[in-house]
Image (tube, grey):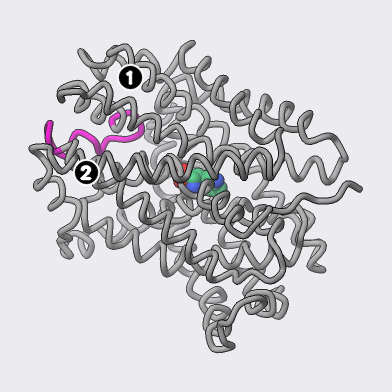
Amino acid sequence: MAQRETWTSRIGFIFAAVGSAVGLGNIWSFPFQTAANGGAAFLVVYLLAVFLIGFPTMMVEFVIGRRGEQNPVAAFGKLGYGNWSFAGGLGVLSTLVTLSFYSVVGGWVLSYIVGSATGAYFGDAGAYFGSVASGPTAIAAHGIFMLVTIGIVASGVTDGIERATKFMIPAILVLLVALGAWATTLDGASAGYSYYLSPDFSVIANNFGSIVPPAMGQAFFTLSLGFSVMIAYSSYLGRDDSLPADGGAIVVVNTMVALLAGFVVFPLLFATGGAEGAGGGAGTAFIAIAGAFGQLPAGGAIGFVFFAVLLFAALSSSISLLEVPVSYVTENYGYSRSTTAVAMGLGIALIGVPATFGTSWLGFYNDVVFKLLLPISVFLLAVFVGWVADTEAVDELGRGSTIGESFTTAWLWWVRVVVPLAVVVTLYLGIDALYTGLTNGAYF
Ligand code: TRP
């Protein structure tokens, strides 16, 4: 068997993992979920979900990945619990579904880069969205986005993923800071900041059931948890790295990018109308943003930069979603990386085609991932690490780090009890919402 690749350095791993985490979730979904769910109140719940549930769950995936040193399915066997491989298998399947519609939205971003350059969305932002979000343009853009993703993954872990993310992550950070600075000059800046940052706690209390599931789903999604991506990435990691330190860095940078995106998006929304127009789902976000760029001086140029940032973020995430099934197939069946990347990528692109039929189809893919697959996967991983492979997990978490036994013990109990409980509540509310959507014809 060929020698398994590893990251060239610890920083290479952190860049790749941050690249996976930082994506459409941070720059597109986060500001708009926040806008739709009451602003700062949502932000508070989201931050709690990221640090209290997301970070410990990231450690769950890291201990499986580094201990297993295999693709996410085989890792369970290597740990000595082969009958749990189905949990890894569910993760691999989920990456296929997720990437299939993620790439459709990636295609929208491509269209908006073009629209910024040509000015096509300046006149009527809603009509432009309608023309690129579904139909032939959407299919073509989806295909192009997938081809770029395939190209990077086919080049391998170090030459493809590591090199691409080392370029994209700094670019995203620098450009977002610049956009945030520009946004301070907008008329809507102070109204935007206050909606974004001063929480009204009664909003949380009164809307608990409708705020918690999206905040939890968003926390898992933005950190790339649940679908074994972090298992796969940490399997290429050296034995003497500190998992909590690396994970902490990844969570902090990912959160910074989301917060920064809010500092761009909220002033922009309030400069031209307010948060209301942006709350209605996948498409309204693009319409609201593009509409704002269309009305502002130099909006086309600035919109171009904004959508370029979004494209980098989307690509550095989509490659992680393709890497998981590709590493599984190459390691299990011995096909070459490039053949596998092409075949799987094209297959996934086909699965995504229905999401180009219209935004309600895309919303269905999105909801299945957020409300069903993510919480189920996280639940399985937490139960596995907390109750089945607990001895190995605690040992692995302590390896290479200076954290003491009290930290690892506290983490274990947290993973045993708190994480599964939080996820079960989320799952219950999510299934309820999905069921309601299906029965009242919200999707098809
Ligand atoms: N985290 C990415 C984002 O915020 C999306 C993503 C990439 C993802 N890999 C994942 C989500 C694995 C869940 C699981 O856009």
Amino acid type indicated by mark 2: Ala
* Left or right: residue 439 compared with residue 125: right
Q: Is residue 275 visible?
A: no
Q: State which quadrant residue 443 falls in.
A: top left
- Residue 299 versus residue 200 in the image, above or below: above
Q: Amino acid at mark 1?
A: Phe
Q: Is residue 271 magenta?
A: yes
Spot occupied by residue 32 in the image (x, y as percentages of width and height): 29, 42
What residue is rendered at 40% in x and 38% in y? 437
From the image, give the main secondary structure of the stretch colored magenta: helix
Q: Residues within 10 Å of mark 1 (few under 14, many from 20)?
A: many
Mark 2 or mark 1, which is nearer the start of the sequence? 1
What residue sits 43% from the left and 58% below the top? 426
At label 2, counting other C-alpha atoms closer than 10 Å, the crowd grade (few under 14, some 14-19, many 20 or more) is: few
Q: Position of residue 432 (x, y in %)?
A: 42, 50
- Looking at the image, residue 232 lies above or below residue 129: below
Q: Secondary structure at mark 1?
A: helix
Residue under the point 70% across and 64% down: 238
Q: Which quarter of the rendered picture does the C terminus lie within?
A: top left
Mark 1 highlights which residue?
129
Can residue 295 be seen from the camera position used here? yes
The dot on residue 195 is none
Q: Position of residue 9 (x, y in %)?
A: 65, 57
Residue 30 lies within the magenta run = no
Name the foreground residue: 268 vs 429.
268
- Whole-percent x and y of residue 350? 63, 23
The number of numbered discs placed on residues in the rendered structure image is 2
Q: Which residues are magenta?
A: 270-284
The residue to which callout 2 is attached is: 181
Tell which of 411 and 36 is nearer to you: 411
